[in-house]
Image (spheres, rainbow, N blue to C red):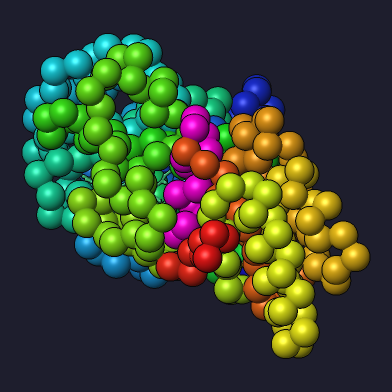
């Protein structure tokens, strides 16, 4: 592997690793670093050729714009053309933290970053290592999740190394990330503002500040998603190698349907895994299914934090099929549901039929 992995804690002992990381960023190279959501693959956002290296390393289409990370909300004017109404209140309430705000693009931001759009996605991350890196580098850092395109986002340095270890020089290892799902993306250039990607900040929390906030219609459906406004939310995404089958419907019915589905798949000679909350486990009693438990459905923050590692772990267990259950739409469930829907790539099954 080409990349060296440097352990960082957010404290004084990080000095040498941070100095190296900041110098790589300033020289137009890539560095992977932890944020409070998932690991990011960072480059100097104001350096077009550095930004192009991100797309090459990930195998990401140029049509999919990047998030610009800032050290502080005070820097917003350096990357935006104007600050939309209501924006300051949101920045005060949620930054530093897992909320990405779409604003009019400032002239300093290369078009590669925004995929040619006249809007730019901006966020101030809360993770101490991300904060320290931004402060040291002294430039805004463009960073998508540090996974190969269409793979589950990385929540540990090992996930980054598995996907991109040959494509960059340095991975800052800050341990497993806290939220485990990406930031919520809120478009402030439309009226009312619209959530393009549900994330670590819930819709309910946003509504306290933007009562009329809209969501793209696809989050309401039980049908496969179509890509539109936020190009990165295209359907093949967060996908393990195994076929993910997502069961919707009332919990009891969905569990019975999953058990039946597992039995049939096993009979057909397929290896079956299940990515489930603890409460679903008894449904698989006596069946040869590799269970990956995400914790209790009463603690969805823990379920979210373990989700991507679970998808990757079941891949490593070489199952052919991964069964999962629709967690609903309340709070973080909407975010978990969104990621499972995308991982399932349209294999969404209704247990009532
Ligand atoms: O938590 C996160 O947001 C992580 C960490 C590293 O900050 N980053 C992340 O980046 O998830 P990425 O590139 O994997 O996802 C960014 C999403 C994509 O869906 C992209 O299409 C959307 O934000 N996006 C970026 N700029 C946009 C813009 N100007 N208009 C609409 N959508 C945009
Ligand atoms: Mg991503």
Q: Is residue 155 left or right of residue 41?
A: right
The percent coordinates of residue 227 (x first, y second) are 27, 60
Prevalent SS, magenta region: helix
Q: Is residue 215 visible?
A: yes
State the residue in front, 71 or 243.
243
User: Residue at coordinates 49% horizontally, 69% vertically from top-left?
Assistant: 347
Query: Which quadrant does the N terminus fall into?
Result: bottom right
In the shown orientation, is residue 50 left or right of residue 338? left
Against 115, residue 304 (above or below) is above
Residue at the spot x=80%, y=68% of the render? 289
Q: Position of residue 157 (x, y in %)?
A: 64, 50
In the displayed structure, 225 sits above or below 6; it is: below
Work out which residue is located at the far front of the displayed protein and give it. Answer: 353
Give the tally of numbered discs. 0
* Residue name at image x 31 percent, y 51 percent: 218
Residue 22 at x, y percent in the picture? 45, 39
Closer to the camera in the image, 273 or 51: 273
Q: Looking at the rendering, which quadrant does residue 220 occupy?
A: top left
Q: Say which quarter of the image contains residue 115.
A: bottom left
- The front one of 140 and 67 is 67
- 156 and 339: which one is in front? 339
Give the residues in magenta.
330-344
For residue 29, say whether it is visible.
no
The location of residue 147, given as percent across then percent down, is: 50, 59
């Amino acid at each position: 592997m080409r990349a060296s992995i440097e352990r960082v804690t957010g404290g004084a002992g990080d000095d040498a690793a941070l100095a190296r990381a900041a110098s790589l960023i300033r020289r137009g190279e890539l560095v992977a670093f932890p944020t409070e959501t998932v690991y990011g693959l960072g480059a100097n956002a104001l350096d077009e050729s550095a930004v192009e290296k991100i797309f090459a390393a990930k195998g990401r289409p140029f049509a999919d714009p990047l998030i610009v990370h800032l050290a502080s909300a005070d820097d917003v004017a350096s990357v935006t053309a104007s600050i939309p109404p209501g924006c300051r209140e949101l920045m005060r309430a949620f930054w530093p933290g897992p909320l990405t705000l779409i604003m009019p693009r400032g002239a300093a931001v290369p078009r590669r970053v925004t995929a040619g759009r006249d809007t730019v996605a901006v966020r101030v991350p809360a993770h101490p290592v991300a904060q320290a890196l931004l402060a040291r580098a002294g430039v805004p850092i463009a960073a998508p999740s540090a996974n190969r395109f269409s793979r589950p986002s990385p929540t540990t340095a090992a996930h980054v190394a598995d996907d991109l270890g040959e494509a960059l020089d340095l991975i800052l290892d800050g341990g497993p990330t806290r939220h485990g799902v990406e930031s919520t993306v809120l478009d402030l250039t439309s009226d009312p503002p619209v959530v393009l990607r549900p994330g670590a900040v819930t819709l309910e929390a946003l509504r306290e500040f933007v009562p009329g906030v809209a969501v793209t219609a696809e989050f309401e459906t039980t049908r496969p998603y179509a890509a539109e406004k936020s190009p990165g939310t295209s359907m093949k995404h967060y996908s393990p190698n195994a076929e993910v089958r997502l069961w919707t419907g009332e919990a009891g019915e969905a569990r019975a349907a999953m058990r039946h589905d597992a039995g049939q798949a096993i009979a057909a000679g397929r290896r079956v895994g299940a990515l489930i909350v603890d409460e679903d486990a008894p449904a698989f009693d006596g069946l040869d299914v590799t269970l990956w438990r995400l914790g209790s459905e009463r603690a969805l923050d823990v379920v979210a934090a373990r989700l991507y590692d679970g998808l990757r772990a079941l891949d490593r267990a070489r199952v052919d099929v991964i069964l999962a259950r629709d967690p609903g739409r309340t709070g973080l469930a909407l975010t978990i549901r969104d990621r499972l829907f995308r991982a399932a790539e349209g294999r969404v099954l209704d247990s009532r039929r």
